[in-house]
Image (spheres, rainbow, N blue to C red):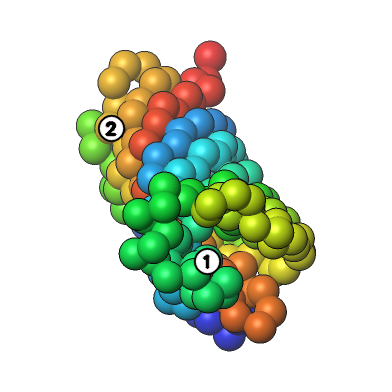
Amino acid sequence: MRRFTRSALVVLLAMAGDASSAMAQDTPLFSLGGGLATPSGVTGNAHTLGFQAGATGVFPITGRLGIATSASYIRLGADQNAVLAETDIDPESFELGGGFIDGGYRWIGGVTVGLRLLLRPRDRQIVPNLAAGVGWAFTGVADRRIWYLGEIEPIEGFNENAPLMRLGGGVEAHVRDGVGLFGAVRYVVAFTNPDRTTALPFTFGVSLRLEER
């Protein structure tokens, strides 16, 4: 993790050095958004499409480079077939019997601090960016209750804490002075045991820049 994170941050710093003479992101930017989240890797074996929401604050350093602080919540649905496999219930019989599963979703609440680099001067109408950050995740799987010809014994969930990493990019479109719309995608990794928890959240929302007076 350390080597991968270092490499990402070095790339951002190098690109920022080349852009230092361009217009700076010289005032703080705050954004709020949400959207869909899809599991990836091993996480996709037990979970399905979900949702996410989050907020970010970007504070300028130099050139087009800024410090980005983010907080987010991701919730991935439980994969029905994976849950049934744990309890030896036949999926076809489960469907015919009107069974359903309550709970079992994977959640990831996390905070990160990192860098964000603008790829164009911020006064342009459309401004793409790259971002990388590390932090801490509070994650787990909710209790599951399976209803099939009556309730089966609940399956207890669990909670855990783990290091967190986010990498990705996005684009912001300026609507009016200080206000914009943005879209972003991140690759999120929580270094849980025994397998990492990974997801791809797609975020859309509103950004507000504190303009200089």
In the rendered structure, the answer to whether residue 85 lies left or right of residue 108 reads left
**What residue is rendered at 46% in x and 34% in y?**
33
Residue 158: where, in percent of width, then height? 75, 62
Determine crowd level at label 1: few under 14, some 14-19, many 20+ residues with C-alpha closer than 10 A.
Answer: some
In the rendered structure, the answer to whether residue 134 lies left or right of residue 198 reads right
Q: Residue furthest left?
A: 125
In the rendered structure, the answer to whether residue 7 lies left or right of residue 108 reads left
In the rendered structure, the answer to whether residue 30 lies left or right of residue 19 reads right
- Residue 36, by quadrant, is top left
Relative vertical location of residue 178 with respect to residue 193 in this rendering, above or below: above
Q: Amino acid at mark 1?
A: Val
Q: Depth check: give the residue in front, 92 or 211.
A: 92
Q: Amino acid at mark 2?
A: Ala
- Residue 182, by quadrant, is top left
Tag nearer the camera, 1 or 2: 1
- Give the mark count: 2
Relative vertical location of residue 198 with respect to residue 179 in this rendering, above or below: below
The dot on residue 173 is 2
**What residue is rendered at 63% in x and 51% in y?**
151
Residue 212: where, in percent of width, then height? 52, 21
Mark 1 — residue? 83
**What residue is rendered at 45% in x and 44% in y?**
51
Residue 15: where, in percent of width, then height? 39, 65
Residue 59: where, in percent of width, then height? 59, 41
Q: Depth check: give the residue in front, 10 or 35.
A: 35
| Residue 117 visible | no
**What residue is rendered at 40% in x and 40% in y?**
35
